[in-house]
Image: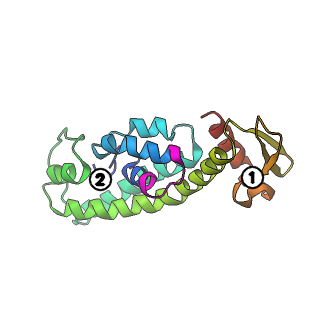
């Protein structure tokens, strides 16, 4: 339960960050809608609603959390900082700290829950903030889906009702190489929402 707090990929910290830190109305609303299921380790509404699926900016930290969480829990259990479960219990829909305590029969599970929560939050934070910045820029400047013009190293957005060009968010219009490819993918994802 520690590895999958909020669901696979440890999405509970993502959900709380969406509620607390995001400026985008859509992401804040998704955080409000998904917090109930997320507490009970059900992250399907968040995975498909944010979306994390087919969104490289949010998929990467989800994968990293799955690996980092498993490694941290393995070391904690192998070094004796947390009891190794003696049996298999199907209590995965109970909130993470309680579920882990019931499985391990160890009160230190609550401490490890908060340690992992901080680690997961640190991993999610920069990715979510970048996604929120891009999402806020697009939703703030365009009432409809933008038309994106990618010419050379310049990236401009054109509103469908207004032909005025807007520079890319956060001064990223002059970036080249992999950053430009990444932004092209992100814009393709955002324009499909």
Q: Which residue is mark 2?
A: 2
Q: Quadrant of residue 90?
A: top left
Mark 2 burial class by Cα count in 10 Å: few <14, some 14-19, many 20+: many
Q: Is residue 132 left or right of residue 46?
A: right
- Residue drawn 63% across and 40% down? 190
Q: Is residue 78 visible?
A: no
Q: Residue 135: x percent and y percent?
A: 61, 47
Q: Secondary structure at mark 1?
A: loop
Q: CA distance from mark 2 to mark 1?
A: 39 Å
How busy is the neighbourhood of tag 1: few (under 14 within 10 Å), some, or many (20 plus)? some
Residue for badge 1 = 168
Q: Where is residue 146 drawn, in percent x and y?
A: 72, 38
Q: In front of the other: label 2 or label 1? A: 1
User: Which numbered marker is on residue 91?
Assistant: none
127 to the left or right of 189 = left
Residue pictured at 64% horizontal, 48% vertical: 140
Closer to the camera in the image, 116 or 52? 52
- Relative to 193, is 180 above or below? below
Where residue 162 appears, as percent x and y from the top left, is 79, 39
Q: What SS does tag 2 mark?
A: loop
Question: How many numbered marks does the figure carry?
Answer: 2
Q: Is residue 113 above or below residue 26?
A: below
Q: Position of residue 142 (x, y in %)?
A: 69, 42
What is the span of residues highlighted in magenta in the rendered image? 17-26
């Amino acid at each position: 339960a520690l590895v999958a707090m909020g669901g696979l990929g440890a999405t509970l910290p993502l959900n709380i960050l969406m509620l607390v830190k995001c400026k985008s109305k859509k992401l804040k609303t998704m955080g409000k809608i998904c917090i109930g299921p997320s507490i009970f380790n059900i992250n399907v509404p968040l995975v498909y609603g944010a979306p994390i699926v087919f969104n490289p900016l949010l998929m990467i930290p989800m994968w990293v959390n799955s690996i980092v969480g498993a490694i941290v829990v393995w070391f904690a259990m192998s070094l004796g900082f947390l009891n190794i479960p003696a049996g298999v219990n199907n209590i995965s829909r109970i909130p993470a700290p309680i579920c882990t305590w019931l499985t391990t029969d160890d009160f230190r599970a609550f401490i490890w829950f908060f340690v992992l929560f901080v680690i997961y939050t640190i991993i999610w934070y920069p990715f979510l903030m970048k996604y929120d910045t891009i999402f806020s820029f697009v939703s703030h400047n365009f009432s409809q889906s933008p038309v994106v013009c990618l010419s050379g190293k310049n990236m401009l957005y054109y509103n469908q009702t207004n032909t005025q060009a807007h520079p890319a968010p956060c001064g990223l219009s002059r970036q080249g190489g992999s950053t430009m490819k990444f932004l092209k993918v992100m814009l393709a994802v955002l324009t499909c929402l």
